[in-house]
Amino acid sequence: MSNDLLIVLMTMITFSCRYLFFMKSLPISLSPKLQHLLQYTAPSVLTAMWVPIVFLGHKTEGAAFFHSPFLYAGLITVLASLEIKNTLAVVVAGIGSFLILNWVL
């Protein structure tokens, strides 16, 4: 199967899945319980992304883990997210702290 055909097929699948949810003539209503469960989607996805980076991204074991810039930048980001309610500011603080710690450590 050629790459062009794969790209066209993936485009059609992605477009059809999204079109079904946004089409006005097809009334799709989610139950309140499902809507409540969907509120946890973004934190779950973000957790699945940052946990391997923080705990496995340093590629070291033992005491070197405690000198990892990933660990301290993650902690700084968590503390910043508790104090600052602006997502962009938290992202900038996390990236900035990682860059500084990666340079210092």
Image: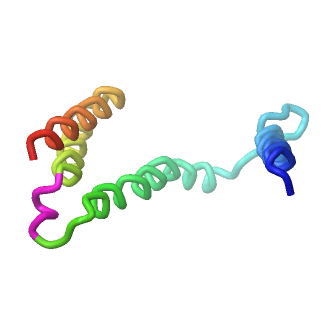
Q: Residue at x 76, y 41 (%)?
A: 18
Considering every residue shown, the one lying at the far front of the view is 2
Q: From the image, which quarter does the N terminus lie in?
A: bottom right
Q: Can residue 57 be seen in this view?
A: yes
Residue 87 located left or right of residue 102? right
Residue 27 locus on image (x, y percent): 84, 40
Considering every residue shown, the one lying at the far right of the view is 25
Residue 60 locus on image (x, y percent): 21, 66
Between residue 28 and residue 54, name the one nearer to us.
Answer: 54
Residue 84 locus on image (x, y percent): 24, 31
Residue 10 locus on image (x, y percent): 79, 48
Q: Residue at x 17, y 43 (%)?
A: 102
Please tell me whether residue 37 is drawn above or below residue 97 in the rendered image: below
For the record, the magenta segment spans 63-68
65 falls in the magenta region: yes
Residue 1 located left or right of residue 51? right
Principal secondary structure, stretch drawn in magenta: helix
Between residue 5 and residue 80, name the one nearer to us.
Answer: 5
Q: Is residue 28 visible?
A: no
34 falls in the magenta region: no
Q: Residue at x 22, y 32 (%)?
A: 96
Between residue 26 and residue 105, name the one nearer to us.
Answer: 105
Considering every residue shown, the one lying at the far bottom of the view is 62
Between residue 44 and residue 92, name the one nearer to us.
Answer: 92
- Marks counted in the figure total 0
Q: Quadrant of residue 90?
A: top left
Q: Residue at x 25, y 37 (%)?
A: 94
